Image: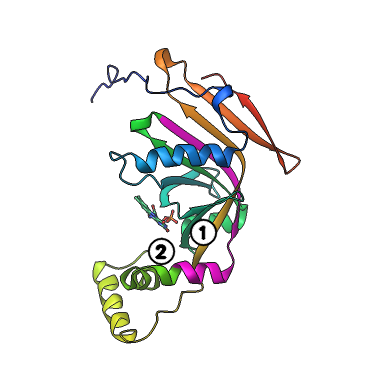
Amino acid sequence: MENLHDKRKVYERSQLIESEIKQNPIEQFRDWFLDASENPVISEANAMAVSTLEDDGCPRTRMVLLKAYTYEGFIFYTNYDSRKGKAIEKTHKACLHFFWPNLERQIIIKANLERIAENLSDGYFHSRPKGSQLGAVVSPQSCEIPDREFLEQKLKDLEEKYENTEVPRPENWGGYIAKPYEIEFWQGRPNRLHDRIIYKLENGIDWKISRLAP
Ligand SMILES: Cc1cc2nc3c(=O)[nH]c(=O)nc-3n(C[C@H](O)[C@H](O)[C@H](O)COP(=O)(O)O)c2cc1C
């Protein structure tokens, strides 16, 4: 067994104080997201963990790529019949999580989820490279499959089928928009006295801002 007791880092890069934050959390998100995406050390700033609640009461988390964000919410694409898709169709909720270690920052977002309009999913699907489009058609995401050959063979068949035609977007593949109702920004600080600022949506329109103990 390995003991990690002495593995610790001093957080001292930045601070998050009320006089400097944005009143709207999406604008605060944009500031931090731009810092992360412009940082040459961070390779996929838009990679986020998405947790959904499963029938056994245990949340399940996996990474997905954030593909857009607006004042309304955060958009990602997936298979609606996947394990996460099934959980979302049931609860219409998820928790999104970003961690950018080099910036000593994390963001935790609780949100209500909806499918985006089909024409928007079509638009994004067809903007992807053909290989990715075929990958989405080939993969019965989250289902058990016999072996890797199953995927390779299906891909080969579909490459021939759609050699000269557009790949139609599978009906069970598309985007979700996660409409936030709570967003917490965490900035690491010295002596474990980290900054935590939380925005909570009140009456469906106003964001109430408060500070949490670290
Ligand atoms: C960095 C990264 C980005 C990913 N992006 C996506 C994505 O945008 N959409 C997606 O469906 N799966 C994505 N995946 C795969 C998921 O983590 C996951 O394996 C898959 O969606 C099936 O999850 P589920 O069975 O829990 O539904 C990504 C994985 C990683 C590591």
Q: Is residue 172 visible?
A: no
Using the image, determine if residue 102 lies above or below residue 141. above
CB at mark 1 closer than 8 A to ligand 1? yes
The reply, left or right, for residue 23 in relation to residue 192 is right
The structure residue drawn at horizontal position 53% and vertical position 25%, both measured from the top left corner, is 196
Residue 211, magenta (yes or no):
no
Mark-to-mark CA distance, 2 and 1: 10 Å
Q: What residue type is disc 2 on? A: Gln
- Residue 199, by quadrant, is top right
The one of 141 and 169 positioned closer to us in this rendering:
169
Please provide percent x and percent y for residue 180.
60, 44
Using the image, determine if residue 70 lies above or below residue 128. above
The structure residue drawn at horizontal position 45% and vertical position 33%, both measured from the top left corner, is 106
CB at mark 2 closer than 8 A to ligand 1? yes
Q: What residue type is disc 1 on? A: Gly
The one of 43 and 37 positioned closer to us in this rendering:
37
Residue that mark 2 sits on: 141
Crowding near pointer 1: few (<14 within 10 Å), some, many (20+)? some
Which of marks 1 and 2 precedes in the sequence? 1
The structure residue drawn at horizontal position 45% and vertical position 26%, both measured from the top left corner, is 187
Instruction: Indicate the quadrant containing the N terminus: top left, top right, bottom left or bottom right.
Output: top left
Using the image, tell me which numbered label, if any, was put on residue 85: 1
Q: CB atoms at circles 2 and 1 under 8 Å apart? A: yes
In the image, the segment drawn in magenta is: 105-124
